[in-house]
Amino acid sequence: MQSFHGQPVLINFWATWCPPCIAELPLLDAFFQEHNAQGWQVVGLAVDKPTAVRSFLARSPVHFPIGMAHENGSDLARSLGNLSGGLPFTIVLGRDGRVLHRKIGQIKAPDLQRWRNLPGVN
């Protein structure tokens, strides 16, 4: 994450067994491809088993980095404000690394449009 300092970052906690998580991945991928040139980074953190994630990504690849949060992913998500531990969970970090927004549940295009214009990301 240090390499993303000074850039807005969208972090998405997801799992292969979570239908809303899977449904939003193409939207996240399109957002990353469209806005990466403006400095936006997207990072997926899979709260899942590595074999399931590798298998899923072999069938449905994305262009942004995916990390494994394993069973510690729930603890990390809670430390970032997801007290219920629900998935999907997305946070937006500003260029200074501060959390600007949190959302539990499936994201939609209007969410991404709104987040793209948050103070601290431009």
Image (spheres, rainbow, N blue to C red):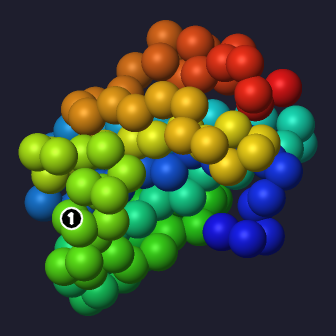
Q: Is residue 68 above or below residue 66?
A: below
**Left or right relative to 46: residue 37:** right
The residue drawn where x is 59% and y is 67% is 65
Can I make out residue 52 in this image? no
Quadrant of the drawing holding the C terminus: top right
Q: Is residue 18 left or right of residue 102?
A: left
* Other residues around mark 1 within 10 Å, as few (<14) / some (14–19) / many (≥20): some
The answer, for residue 82, to whether it is visible in the render is yes
Displayed quadrant of residue 79: bottom left
Q: Is residue 38 above or below residue 111?
A: below
- Residue 17's place in the image compared with 91, above or below, is below
Return the x and y of residue 57 as percentages of the image width and height: 41, 70
**Above or below: residue 89 compared with residue 106:** below
Which residue in the protein does label 1 denote?
A: 74
* x and y, in percent, of residue 102 in the image: 40, 33
Secondary element under disc 1, as helix, strand or loop, is helix
* Residue under the image location 25 percent in, 78 percent down: 72
